[in-house]
Amino acid sequence: MATTSPHNDLQVQITNKQILKIALPISLAIFIPQLNFITNNIFLGHYDNDSHALAVAGITGVYYLIFAAIGYGLNNGLQALIARRAGENRPDEIGNIFTQGVLISVIISAAGIIITYTITPYLFSLILHDPVVHKKAVEFLQIRIWGLPFLYVFQLRNALLVGTNQSRYLVAGTLAETLTNVGLDYLLIFGMLGFPELGFNGAAIASVIAEFVGMFVIFLVIRWKGISKRFNLFRRLKWSKENNALIFSMSAPLMFQHAISIISWQFFFLLTEHHGEMALKVSNVMRNIFGIFGCVTWAFAATTNAMVSNVIGQGKQEQVPGLLKKIITLSTGVAIVSCILLNLFPVMFLSIFGQGNEFIIAALPVLRVITAGMILMSFSIVMLSAVTGTGNTRITFYIELFAIILYCIYVYLVSEYFFLPIKFGWMSEWLYWLSLFVPSLLYMRSGRWKNKII
């Protein structure tokens, strides 16, 4: 590997500085969309003309996350491939792989739109008890789902930037998306400055427009910085059987993995609806807490995926354990500080949703439970992402499937069969993250990943 190559900046170094250089822009890029979610919920919590809005937002938010997670799986597989080619100093291959990923994402997003209009209304009618909740959820989703193709292309551009060690450029697109979403939320939910008052559905329209803006801005950045030219993006728009087979072998297990992970969360929310509107509101806010305070953890996970693949591409497999130790130390440290702050000032955070003292009293014990889960997540997701970075995505899928089965059994027994308070239902997060960590750790220690070629 020529160290004097003009492209040698594609290869990463195993230092805390390098880890933070990749992870911090990613965390900001993840934080900004999560800020969109929480802004939606804050506005809906203060929208007095619809008392159901905040509760229904929990169901619709998790549903959309299912399809977002499928895109995230494609993104992770593509990111590992791009990072491997970067580590091998093969920039010409990066553009071909990226272009095929975009073609695949367009097909998947079309399927998601069709499913939302045909199958989803029927499935929701079988599970949801409240007809008002059902009607609002379906109407919202049939607007919201049109943002999916924009989200997928945006995610894949993120994979390109992270995989080629250029995560600093992520911020522009996500910042544009957030400013658009927050502004349109205010205008369309409440009907301000001459805009129609669309309430709950206004949040859906705002999010779709914001996702288009985010995708468009990051497209301009990539073009302006010469990245499109450097990697010959979209030079070959033909369907490539060879590259698509490679992408599917890497990404398909991850797409299934992330999809079933969020489907299990949707299962949890649908069962929580049986506990009443307050339980659903509390759970929706807990989802927001996981999202907003877990941004750094997810950023370290994405960093792990890219760096492990890059380091293996350089032929330095023996340095992977040391890299993981550094990332886990940073990730867990940030999670512990975040959880201490949440437990010291819980009322201050919970009160911003405008739901009153009854809501805060109901949410406090659940908050204590999920903060412990966030610490478990901080090292478990890093270890699982290391498995992904090795290229053994089928192993990642099997580990996830094992954890999901245990999770769903627990959730059904606790939330539906024994009908225990929702704080016990949220303890499922403890089981889930530990079920991911243990087999991931055992696999990485086995060393069976060292000769994997992708």
Image (tube, rainbow, N blue to C red):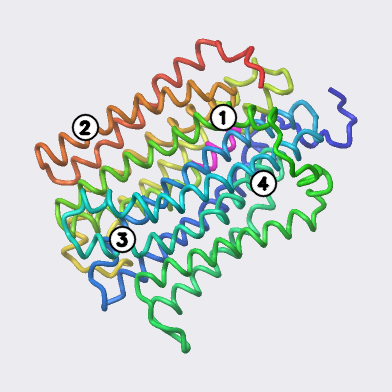
Image quadrant where residue 277 sits: bottom left
Mark 2 and mark 1: Cα distance apart in space: 33 Å
Q: Residue at x 36, y 67 (%)?
A: 42
- Look at mark 2 in the image and give the residue it sits on: 410
Q: Earlier in the sequence, mark 3 or mark 4?
A: 3
Instruction: Name the front one of labels 2 and 3.
Output: 3
Out of 259 and 359, give the one closest to the viewer.
Answer: 259
Q: CA distance from mark 1 to mark 4?
A: 19 Å
Tell me the magenta residue range: 298-305
Q: Residue at x 45, y 57 (%)?
A: 145
Residue 200, position in %: x, y?
35, 70
Question: Which residue bears the numbered disc 1?
Answer: 326
Picture quarter with the C terminus: top right
Residue indicated by mark 3: 137
User: Which of the 4 image quadrants contains residue 58?
Assistant: bottom left
- Work out whether residue 450 or residue 121 is closer to the camera in this orientation and state it: 121
Spatial CA distance of label 2 from label 4 is: 38 Å
Residue 149: image quadrant is: bottom right
Q: Earlier in the sequence, mark 3 or mark 1?
A: 3
Counting residues from the start of the chain, the first of labels 2 and 3 encountered is 3
